[in-house]
Amino acid sequence: MKNREAVKSIIKAVLLAFILLRPFIDGLTYPIQNSIFHLVVISLVVIWLCSFFWQKGETFLLLKSPPDLPLLLFLLFLLVSSSFSSCHYLSFHLSLQFIGYFLLYWLVVNNIEEKEVKGFLIIILFSATLISLYGIYQYFWGLEATRKFIATHYRMEELPEALLSRLSSNRVFSTFVYPNILAGYLIMLFPIGMTMAIESRHFFKPIFLGICALLLYCLFYTKSVGGWIGLFFILGFFLIFYFFKEGKKILFFGGLFLSLFLLIFFLFFKFGGLPHLSAFRDRIGYWSAGFRMIKENPFFGSGPGTFGSRFARYKLAYTMETQHAHNNFLEIWVETGVFGLLLFLWIWGNFFRAAVKRIIQRNKSVGRRLSQIHTDDTRCHPECKAKGLLLKERFFPRIEYGVRMTFLRLSASKRGNSLILLGLSLAIFGSLIHSFGDFDLYDPSLATIIFFILALAVVMLKDTRPYRIKKSVLTKTALFLIIGMVILSGGMNLREILAERKAKQAVQLMNEEKFKEGRVMLQKALFWQSTNPSYWYRLAEVDQKIALIQRDSLAWERAIEEMKRAIFFNPYPAYYHYTLAKLYWIKGIREGKESLLEKAIAQLKEAVNRYPTKSIYHLELGKLYEFLGEEERAKKEYKEAEKWNRLFRSESEN
């Protein structure tokens, strides 16, 4: 028993540090650190599972929670869908991330007690305070310093347009890279700070209220419309759940609130009153492309993590390129089909059904208490008198009653932790609402925090029931196999770390024009992840540069074979086919082989098929047709190139 408690203490201490540091390292920008965080979770899970062998007694004790079954089924479906994906690397990479989130969830549910939840929430809010302060610093000083640094050390024409536009927009993103993801983080933590302020003693109230104000101040500088919409929903449903005690009233006023919002949104949209209309128009383009993808494979999807690779084939001409649908539910539908989407919705449906039931029970108990007070003929309830809230009834009867009722609601809510549960539930609800317009669950840092908060909310539900599993040979064998699978997932994370380190070193060497050394590093990266298509693509680029500098025909052959490998592991990106076409084209001209030029045409056609609105691909195909003397085909491709180029310019001007 002592060993078991010692393991729990270690797990809690590491989790405190984990949730404090996690928001500071965004997984999209720092993939190595993201894998390290997953390794920490996996290590804790292995220690926790191994502690069952040390536990005395005849049974294992596991806790059952409402989202358990849909979480497990969704994870199994992700793995099955990944095995049928056209790009196994991307699919298993995303599945590995979700494995980490789910393991973290079960780790928290089984090792953190209800009385310890507030301590973790204080750590989360402290971390959010630092993130917000850095965001505010970024707005007033940091962005300008970053612009000066980039202008001094980089060539502006070589930088991505998305980065330049983000730096010039003055929209803060703090540590989350994207302003909208920062907004999703802030609105998720706002209801937690708000309920902690209401529930806390007088000394701590101004501290939590100050944190809430800081979160809102930073949210303002993100200039995220989706963030303010999410905050509007959080506040609206907080008032509904806080002041209504019957399920029917909550349902009625919740539906009325939602209907009014949709009506106001429609009117603003129709009369051009929505800010950032171009961003909203881009999202319409993303969603439209997503629904066209769904039509091809509505039931099982194209495989987890493949949306970004497939998007170009379905995008509208004016829509910006993207890796995500900016709608988590739509993206999950695209990648895992309707069955995956239903399982995903089941996770949140099970949780909210249990949470709403619990909150309504609290409201009913408070309502009964208020009804008793309402029928009391005394001038003031003793609790109000003790707090100095007695007012002269002949002057302020309604004000006194309102103050008295508000105080009693607050004091009644303090008798349990249901108010904290309401804040946690609204945090999850707000993140899901925000996910309708962004990709919160596809940002590793934010997704980790969402599942951590979900686990804390389940702990507060008091709806977890223990499973008592006998220590038979069968259960010990099953537990041993589970530990083995968890260790295997940790090994995959370790391979990602080792591969990414070598790839990062390769990029640095290539920037220094040390191509041979860079090639060696890329080969080492491929040793750890031989199915990563981006590494094969980079290797082909290196060999192409070596071939051009040294006029090495063997290096050119290697580049062609490496591009074929990249396409084999991920056939979707159009620029893979375009790069291979250029390799065939140049080699065909040098060697005078028309067969290579035919291969170049085939790859350019595939590039056009994968990205039909990209004018440069039509233009290059037209040039190749013209070179081969096929004038009619060349004219047709030139017309297509001009059409898409003109359409893009006209849409951009509007």
Image (spheres, rainbow, N blue to C red):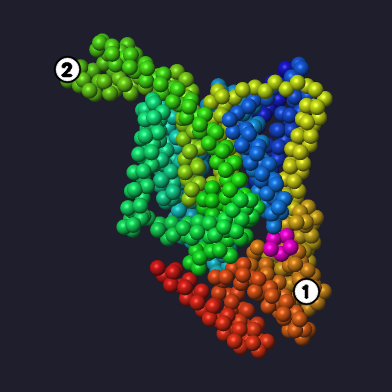
Where disc 2 sits, the SS reads loop
Our reading of the magenta stretch's main secondary structure is helix
Image-quadrant location for residue 351: top right
Dot placed on the residue nearer the N-terminal end, 2 or 1: 2
Disc number at residue 556?
A: 1
Lateral position of residue 102 relative to residue 647, left or right: right
How crowded pointer 1 is (Cα within 10 Å; few <14, some 14-19, many 20+) is rated as many
Residue 576 image position (x, y, % from top left): 67, 67
Number of marks in picture: 2
Lateral position of residue 323 relative to residue 136, left or right: right
- Front residue (pair 15, 278): 278
Q: Which residue is mark 2?
A: 394
Which quarter shows the N terminus? top right
Residue located 46% across and 35% down the image: 426
Where disc 1 sits, the SS reads helix
CA gap, disc 2 and disc 1: 95 Å
> Height in image: 369 above or below 493?
above
> Where are the magenta residues, as a range?
567-571
- Residue 601 visible somewhere in the drawing: yes
Residue located 41% across and 45% down the image: 229
Residue 111 image position (x, y, % from top left): 64, 26
How crowded pointer 2 is (Cα within 10 Å; few <14, some 14-19, many 20+) is rated as few
> Height in image: 210 above or below 335?
above
Which quarter shows the C terminus? bottom left
Residue 458 image position (x, y, % from top left): 56, 29
Residue located 36% across and 39% down the image: 257
Residue located 55% across and 41% down the image: 345
Give the amino acid type for the residue marked by disc 2 in the picture: Arg
Give the amino acid type for the residue marked by disc 1 in the picture: Trp
